[in-house]
Image (cartoon, rainbow, N blue to C red):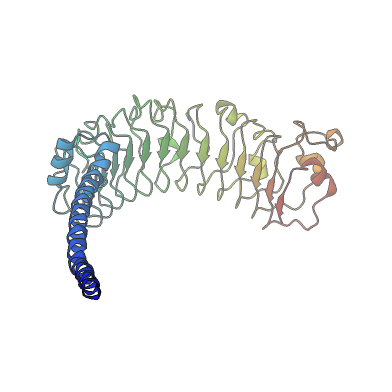
Amino acid sequence: MRATGASDNQQSYSLVEQRNQTSPGCMQTTYSSWRSSLDTKMAIFLSLFCIMSLLSPVLSQDMPYEEYMAQVQACPQECRCPPNFPRAVYCDNKGLKNIPKIPPHTWYLYLQNNQIEVLSADALRNATQLRWLNLNHNKITSEGVEEGFLNAMSHLAHLYMDDNLLSSVPSPLPGSLEHLRLSRNRISKIPAGVFLGLDKLNLLDLQGNKLMDDAVTEVSLKGLNNLVQINLAKNQLTSMPLGLPPTTTQLFLDGNNIEKIPAGYFKGLPKVAFLRLNHNKLGSSGVPKNVFNVSSILDLQLSHNQLTEVPLIPAGLEHLHLDHNKIKSVSGPNVCPVSVDAVDASINESVPRLRYLRLDGNEIKPPIPRDVILCFRLLTSIVI
């Protein structure tokens, strides 16, 4: 019995020992199989992820895979073509003197900060789908813009040619254009009819040029039927420009030599909301009393002029900059658009909307008169 028990115990021990010896192997085999399966699945997942990462910009820009591959492979060696933004070509800051051959499916082309002087008619013949062209900070002259270079781009919406050597607004321009920036050139001429057919143009930036009164006329601006913003700051104007379209909302005339504003001038600009006339030569005698009494004006800037009086403030005006003039005093009856007595304690539509008033740099001594505060009860900031 004892022998049998011993034998049984021995046999039992052997089986346990056998299990202990064989289990790790089985577990190792099972773990290896599981790990191998996991590695395979992970590899497949990573492959799919990489493919989707490459395809996602293509899909997001609605670009067929064949076009995507052709675009990437045709990237000029002088430029950079990000795979995640396949319709953009970056050739900026490369010291280029000529435009390289651009891939055919390019929408956004960046050529700023180079040494380009000439835009030949066939320079972008291959890039017929351009929407955005940046040529800022080059050496392009008006003579260097060959006819047919710009108007051949039938999809171009944004054209930037700031800081070049242009002496005239380039012509002809594509009818698809929405934004045209030509600041800080040498432009002294706007060819008659250059804007005809540009019904989509809503922003025109001509600041920092050499435009005089005879260059900015109804004839030269004809065709700007939907213009919203025009920047004529830092030119050589001595009078308010004529011929601005009635759609104009933002008018920037800072840094000219304007001395007076004709009575009723803004009746032809019923939508003007932002008006900047800083750094001119406007005196109170050149500013008719009711000239700014236009309901659409929200922001009026007349800083750094020669005003001796505060002009009549329209009821809807919210921001007024009159700093650095020669104003000696301000009183409610002279500047309030409504009778001070008529302004009740409640906040309603009859209350003038002025919220910000800047008067520093004048000869006004604080405090601001009480009737001014009563009139403009929505004022949150006065700088004096």
**69 sits to left or right of 234:** left
Residue 303 is situated, as x and y percent measured from the top left of the image, at: 61, 50
Outermost residue, right direction? Answer: 341
Q: Nearer the viewer, residue 355 or 24?
A: 24
Q: Nearer the viewer, residue 265 or 118?
A: 118
**261 sits to left or right of 20:** right
Residue 79 is situated, as x and y percent measured from the top left of the image, at: 19, 52
Q: In the image, what residue occupies the spot 51% across and 26% down?
A: 246
> Is 356 above or below relative to 298?
below
Residue 6 is situated, as x and y percent measured from the top left of the image, at: 23, 74
**364 sits to left or right of 233:** right
Residue 350 placement: quadrant: top right
Q: In the image, what residue occupies the spot 17% across and 60% down?
A: 29
Residue 262 is situated, as x and y percent measured from the top left of the image, at: 59, 33
> Is 117 above or below relative to 18?
above
Mark yes or no: residue 131 visible.
Answer: no
Mark yes or no: residue 209 visible.
Answer: yes
| Total numbered badges shown on the rendered structure | 0
Residue 215 placement: quadrant: top left
Q: In the image, what residue occupies the spot 20% across and 58% down?
A: 30
Quarter holding the N terminus? Answer: bottom left
Quarter holding the C terminus? Answer: bottom right
Q: In the image, what residue occupies the spot 65% across and 34% down?
A: 291
